[in-house]
Amino acid sequence: MWGWRGTLADDVERQVGAVNAALASLGAQPVDSDTVRHHFATSAPAMCAGILGRALTDRERTRASVAFETYHSRRPPADLLPGTEDLLNRLIRSGCSHSVLSLSAHNGLTRHISDLGIGSLFLRVDGRTGPSSRSKKQSLSRHLSTLRQTTGDRPTVLIGDAVDDVRAALANQIHPVPYAGGLTHPDILRSIGVPVAETLAEAAALAVEYAHTA
């Protein structure tokens, strides 16, 4: 399965803009992409807290979340990275299947994937349906439970660009493939001790290799 953000073009730039909008709502100065990637987390308040080096108040958390989401809502939807759709189709022809799990809001996620014309490439697309969460662990457990009604006991691999993706996969006893082209700084991903893919094609190759040997 795929972490959605890592497949999108210009997503690091978008995320930096959104984080800086959240920081501005707190009266803080903007930061560069390297800082955002070193402090990437699954929510805007968590990223702001990491960058500022302090916990946020409840009011600040709400303010940061609203500013972050408002920034994204005013940007046009991101396109896929070049070659991603072809990669997905080639994997399907080789016998693989795909699903998407994201902590992005479910309705916006499914609409975005539909607008890109690739909805038919995924067995399942699950986004966030409740309050923001700091971890994919529980949502991944639910996603896998439903997915396996279709896939059975076939090997499952999670390709994602965040430390939380790796931790959630390991907690659910599936194989993670970290991807260095996303929002988490590659040095942080490499510190986990799991082989890191530099490109989506390399991530797919590692996933297929694992599936064939599992």
Image: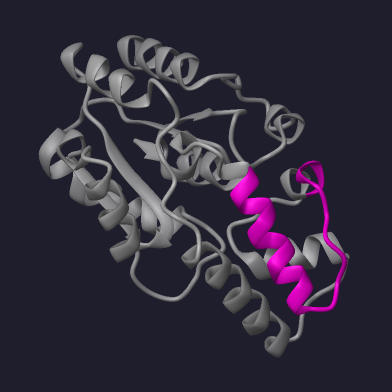
Residue, x 31% and y 10% (percent of image)?
212
Q: Is residue 90 left or right of residue 72?
A: left
Picture quarter with the N terminus: top left
Residue, x 47% and y 20% (percent of image)?
203
Q: Position of residue 131 (x, y in %)?
A: 45, 76
Picture quarter with the C terminus: top left
Q: Is residue 9 above or below residue 29?
A: above
Q: Nearer the viewer, residue 44 or 169?
A: 44
Q: Is residue 160 visible?
A: yes
Q: Residue furthest left?
A: 150
Q: Is residue 142 visible?
A: no
The question of residue 20 being in magenta is answered with: yes
Q: Is residue 150 left or right of residue 35?
A: left
Q: Nearer the viewer, residue 118 or 176?
A: 118
Residue, x 69% and y 87% (percent of image)?
58
Q: Specify the principal SS of the magenta part.
A: helix
Write down the region rendered in magenta. Answer: 13-35
Q: Position of residue 111 (x, y in %)?
A: 26, 57
Q: Position of residue 148 (x, y in %)?
A: 19, 41
Q: Is residue 214 left or right of residue 185?
A: left
Q: How many labels sit on residues?
A: 0
Q: Is residue 82 left or right of residue 163?
A: left
Residue, x 27% and y 39% (percent of image)?
99
Q: Position of residue 32 (x, y in %)?
A: 81, 48
